[in-house]
Amino acid sequence: MTALLLGFSAALLAARGELAWAAACVLGSFAMDGLDGALARKFGVTSPFGAQLDSLADLCGFGVATPLLAYHWMNDAAPQYLIVPTCAILAASAMIRLARFNVQPKDTRYFSGLPAAVPPVILAGAIQLGVEPSAGYVGLIGGLAVLMVTTFPYAKIGRLVGLPWWVWPISVTAVIVSPMTACGLLSAVYVASGPVLWATERFRRDDPALVVDPPEAAPDTADPIDPIELSPGSHVRVAVVGAGFAGLGMAIRLKQLGIEDFVVLERADDVGGTWRDNVYPGAACDVPANLYSYSCAPDPGWTHTFPTQPEIQRYLRRCVAQFGLEPHLRLGHDVLAAEWNDDSTRWCVDTSKGQLTADLVVIASGPLSEPATPSIPGLEQFTGVTVHSANWVPSHDLKGKHVAVIGTGASAVQFIPEIQPDVARFYVFQRTPPWVIPRWDRTKSGVEKALFRRLPSMQRLARAVVYLWRESLILGLTVNTRMLKPVEWLARSHLRRQVSDPALRAALTPDYALGCKRLILSNDYFPAITRDNVELVTSGIDEVRRHSIVSADRTERVVDMIIFGTGFESAHSPIAGRLRGRNGRLLADIWHDTGAEAYLGTAIAGYPNLFMLLGPNTISGQNSTLLTMEAQVEYVIDALRFMDQAGVAAVEVRAEAQASFVVDVRRKMTGTVWLSGCRSWYLDDRGRNTTLWPGFTRSFRQRTGRFDHESYVLRGRDSKPLDSPPAETAH
Ligand code: NAP
């Protein structure tokens, strides 16, 4: 209430021209709003106003204060030196609110500060540029329209009153045509929907609190996790396959929502997935740590901007302890096959240590789990050591050896500088040079860590800044590659500064569009390549002999060891060869014919009650993939909730929904930099990008923001299709 009163006071003060006080009230409103959220979380209370209060603060602050500021500007009622800083304060407040993105409970995701910052920025910009007030006002209305369109909780209100989606564009048009009437009506519905939704949901479902405080972080431990075996004939509600970032993320959310009846099947003896396996020297993540962590488990203790493999692995182990996941882990249980049984509406899962049945299976085996080793003529007769970066054994002794590396992708660029000082002779076989930009890494100071520990919102702000910077790259990757020119300039000057030899520099200069392959961050790769013991070989490999590699120019180089930095079988998901759906068909066979396809990258027609995390077209090419993965996790949770409420035993995505999603993705993919002609692990054998999501991560979160049961065939316990879920459970 205080937040609301302060918001309205801000509007009134602004109307009277007392802009400094108005700005103070706006800030106070946000502070109270934040405090309200913090207290609600602390005491586990959900406010009847919930998101509505948040958004009303937005509307008061930005939707009301900004037009009033514009009014003063147009009528010369307040000096420019007051209006512009007030706009700046408004925009900054909006951005601070944005820092809360992605830690919000699911239903309030639609409210971010970014659109809210647009109107005051437009206004301040118009004043500074000396734009005619009338023209500036048109821009301002455009900005407000952005705010309305992007922050309105369509899904929530649509769900409440059962209106079809097209009502909202019409409403927005009405706002533009007759602003006062339409705004009044919409605001009334909007505000009223808070308590009504709260009341109806409270009685309708037994829904655990959406915002759950993570338990205290657990201390680091290197002790092995105690193995737990499957009990014979066991049945679970959910079987998660894979205990990497995605599988553990799923487990955490199940746990948080009080669902205990699940297991996580993991073929290895530890959690961590790709971060457990990739222990090669220098392994690290190129997404800053603040963003490369679960949104529900921020870690103030990261030691560097970019987390190293051991740190990430420790983080995941800590999450296992912190969220109490050990009892659910079934380590050393390789999933050999899983088959859907229509009669029992269950999955029957065969593991290397026994069988179980599950109502629902979540595949979280990840796209980077199977190392890809090229078939090079004569490789089998090589008598030296061969190793793939993903199977690195830390005890490899490289001192004084002649070593060859095949591949110069993200992994190789990380381990080449680490290995180079040790070896006698180092041959780097490069097929395609990568685009490399500087890696702005630094050790985090104690002050920074203490600040993040005491004021978690500061860490969320840091996370938001990284998120925004990375998200902005999508425009260059998908809309107009010319926007990536500054990044290309940065990469070229990085190469120029680090490599002085023109011939070597030419060999290291890519001839394809930047962004077509994954952009690489490194400060020590080029310097390592210039060292005397390193030879960059660009002529391709003809054959491998017992002790040597022969390149296409027929030069033979004697080597003791070959390291494959040749990436992963991402386009041929091995798990697809183990999943049999409703008609007994292997997913691998279907995907062999069609290419990897899934609805929202998550559900597959013919495979009821099966969801795939980080499935086809879900990886973010510009941002942390954990963002899309978490969106999928929420989608699965929503599906579970829906099934419980509606008494639905099986959900299977409709083939036409999947087909139309795939067509949409392909259309969006056309003209993107990823299809501009380079070879990359994003593309399948047909040259289609079946890996990346062609858009903002936010748009993916919106698409998966609600389990859209209309796109699914629903079946009851008798496995007969239900026409529609019972009306009172309409979701
Ligand atoms: P990658 O990016 O797919 O690179 C594979 C490299 O091997 C490329 O240089 C490729 O050359 C080369 N190659 C493949 N087959 C070859 C052959 N038959 N002959 C010669 N060269 C061959 O694999 P990666 O470096 O392991 O990285 C895979 C992905 O893992 C990354 O894109 C990234 O998403 C992830 N990763 C992330 C991080 C991180 O910091 N977050 C670190 C490591 C890995 P071409 O370019 O000519 O195909």
Image: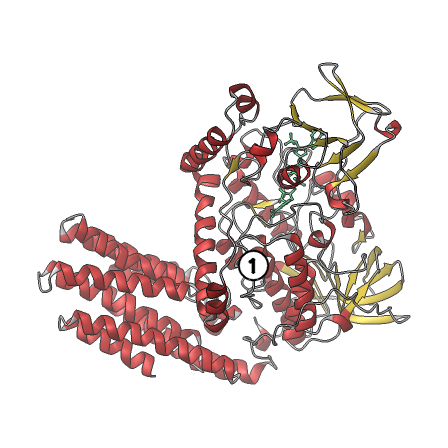
Q: Quadrant of residue 54?
A: bottom left
Comparing 687 with 377, the one in front is 377
Residue type marked 1:
Thr
Q: Position of residue 189 (x, y in %)?
A: 37, 75
- Asked whether residue 182 is in view, the answer is no
Q: Quadrant of residue 172?
A: bottom left
Q: Residue furthest top?
A: 554
How has the structure been colored for display?
secondary structure
Comparing 432 with 26, the one in front is 432
For this view, does 261 lie left or right of residue 628? right
- Asked whether residue 504 is in view, the answer is yes
Circle 1 is placed at which residue position?
303
Q: Position of residue 459 (x, y in %)?
A: 47, 64
For this view, does 327 lie left or right of residue 522? right
Residue at image point 53% right, 28% down: 512
Residue at image point 75% right, 14% down: 554
| Secondary structure at numbered mark 1 | loop
Badge 1 residue CB within 8 Å of ligand 1: no
Residue at image point 44% right, 43% down: 475
Q: Position of residue 404 (x, y in %)?
A: 73, 30
Neighbor class of circle 1 (other Cα within 10 Å; few <14, some 14-19, many 20+) is some
Residue at image point 38% right, 59% down: 114
Q: Residue furthest left?
A: 76
Residue 530 position (above or below residue 176): above
Residue 43 position (above or below residue 369): below
Residue 688 position (above or below residue 339): above
* Quadrant, the N terminus: bottom left
Q: Quadrant of residue 307?
A: bottom right
Q: Quadrant of ligand 1?
A: top right
